[in-house]
Image (spheres, grey):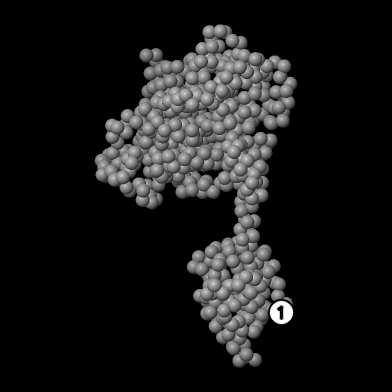
Amino acid sequence: MAPARRAARGRIGIFLALLLRGARFTPAALAVNPPPAAGCGTVHGPAAESRPPTQASKLEPKLVTVLREGYTRALLVQDVTAGVIVGVVALPLAIAFAVASGVAPEQGLITAVVAGFIISALGGSRVQIGGPTGAFVVLVAEIVHKHGYAGLQTATLMAGVLLMIMGLARLGGVIRFIPYPLTVGFTGGIALIIALTQVRDLLGLRMDEVPGEFLPRLQAYAAALPTWNPWALVLGLGTAALVWAWPRVTRRVPGSLVAIILATAAVQVFGLPVETIGSRFGAVPSSLPMPRLPDLSWPLVRELFSPALAIALLAGIESLLSAVVADGMTGRRHRSDMEIVAQGVANVASPLFGGIPATGAIARTATNVGNGGRTPVAGIVHALTLLLLMLVFGRWAELIPMAVLAGILLVVAGNMSEWRYFLKLLKSPKSDVVVMVNAFLLTVVVDLTIAIQAGVVLSALLFMKRMSDVTQTGYVPSLREQDETSDPGALMLREVPDGVAVFEVYGPFFFGAADKFKTAINRIDRAPRVLILRLRHVPAIDATALHALEDVCIRSAKSGTRVVLSGVQPGPLATLHKAGIDALVGRENVTADIDEALARARDLLGAAVGRS
């Protein structure tokens, strides 16, 4: 065995051992072996996993859970089989995604090995398969184009740290609030750009450099069109057709691998004049490099924070989406916080070894489950399979034609475009259409970082607008014109004394509705002697609404109007108490319901008459 290969394997062994130590593999944990649950079907495990996990177990890798339950030989056979198959499937994809991202092909393999192992060993999903994905292609290419690979290393490491912080802070569930129209919009934009970036290799155009921007890229393609290579076009379209049709033949062997083998053999046998990985990138290394820290100087960190945040958000969204898909296939539940932490660790480790950003891969995860993978061991085997393929066959990767990778990525782009959902969402409410189209156009014309950030802000603003529209404020009975006799708390069933006005708020009382509240409460000809603020349908109240409420109380006191609060729910009541609003109106004027409020209003009116 060559010394370099022995050294590489030694480094890998140390690396894996350190990871396993960090995953809390304690003798006590391995000694516990509770009886399996009844009725679990094809997936094993104790009934305890179906119960809501404790805070501690949420940050426990699923691999530890599996080993605690008891890992059988039958499961090992299933996982090894699935892991080997997924590893073979991931090989051409890892190379294709790296090339499409503007980095060397071996960097995709390194990412699939290092990040794939970590995501499976430390993740919160039993069957998640991690590695480079098509979702990152556009973002990575933009960062490499602007800052070089050194900048990508720094941004990826920063994104990993952000992901770990989010997971440890139990913010894994927050990522789920990313709106679906936003996801469909930027995913469709990514798919279009992936397809466009393959035009050069698909047509075999002779171009020294391809512009990163959308319109200049189209202009450059048009200028280079006379240099197109018919052999490249035949190989590319033939590959796309084979990959698209191959699942109808068999799903055991990936069509992308079959296409690579056949096309590479044809190019070598017939001497076809097409560009290959070797002619563009040179020899492909067949070992893992030594880890090294990227540039972490403060000016570069500050400059790359925005791209790092985009990588972190995209990694979180894709990984949790993949985990949810896996849950639907296996009947299990993933731990979102632990999954986000694992994604963070993977994205810290990957750039140290020369890799690129990684996340959960939906297609490879589905392949894992479909081939019998049931525990994280399958994902670990997938990473080790890729490592073996890289060590043994890595040097042969330089013979792969670039047009073949372009054909594979065309199919990937078509599959991830979700064009059916895109067209379907065009019939949704206008605000959702605006979010989706905005994300799509910004991704294509500007860049993905701005698309994600602008999409999140726009979605939040539109959500606040909707909530503001839902919240109703006004004097009763003018607030609601319909008959309220079916409501036992309806004001029309009660006698309201002269000089008393009842003002009601329906819905969340927050800054989006505060201006509506102030406008509506001033629409009265003469100030009442008692103003009842009925808040029975207010589930939450924020600082802006508190300020508006305080302003009304102060102005009412100046005009001689007493304020009575009615039906405040426990949550908002605690907020009012902290803000001192209850003391401002008088704690005796904070009542449980409308009947008590009206009785208090009569007492105040009687006291006023007595004083006069």
Side of 331 where 486 appears, left or right: right
Q: Which residue is nearer to you in this view: 356 or 225?
A: 225
- The residue under label 1 is 526
Q: Is residue 271 above or below residue 128?
A: above
Residue plotted at (63% across, 40% down): 423
Side of 490 where 350 appears, left or right: left
Q: Position of residue 213 (x, y in %)?
A: 68, 31
Q: Position of residue 128 (x, y in %)?
A: 43, 36
Q: Quadrant of residue 149?
A: top right
Q: Position of residue 565 (x, y in %)?
A: 56, 74
Q: Secondary structure at mark 1?
A: loop
Is residue 579 visible in the rendered image? The answer is: yes
Q: Position of residue 347 (x, y in %)?
A: 49, 35
Q: Quadrant of residue 151?
A: top right
Quadrant where the image shows the N terminus: top left
Is residue 384 visible in the rendered image? The answer is: no
Residue plotted at (57% across, 23% down): 240
Q: Quadrant of residue 495?
A: bottom right
Q: Residue furthest front?
A: 248
Q: Residue furthest top?
A: 270
Q: Which residue is nearer to you in this view: 470 or 148?
A: 470
Mark 1 neighbour density, 10 Å: few (under 14) some (14–19) many (20 or more):
few
Q: Is residue 45 above or below residue 402?
A: below
- Disc 1 marks a residue whose amino acid type is Arg
Q: Is residue 280 above or below residue 373?
A: above
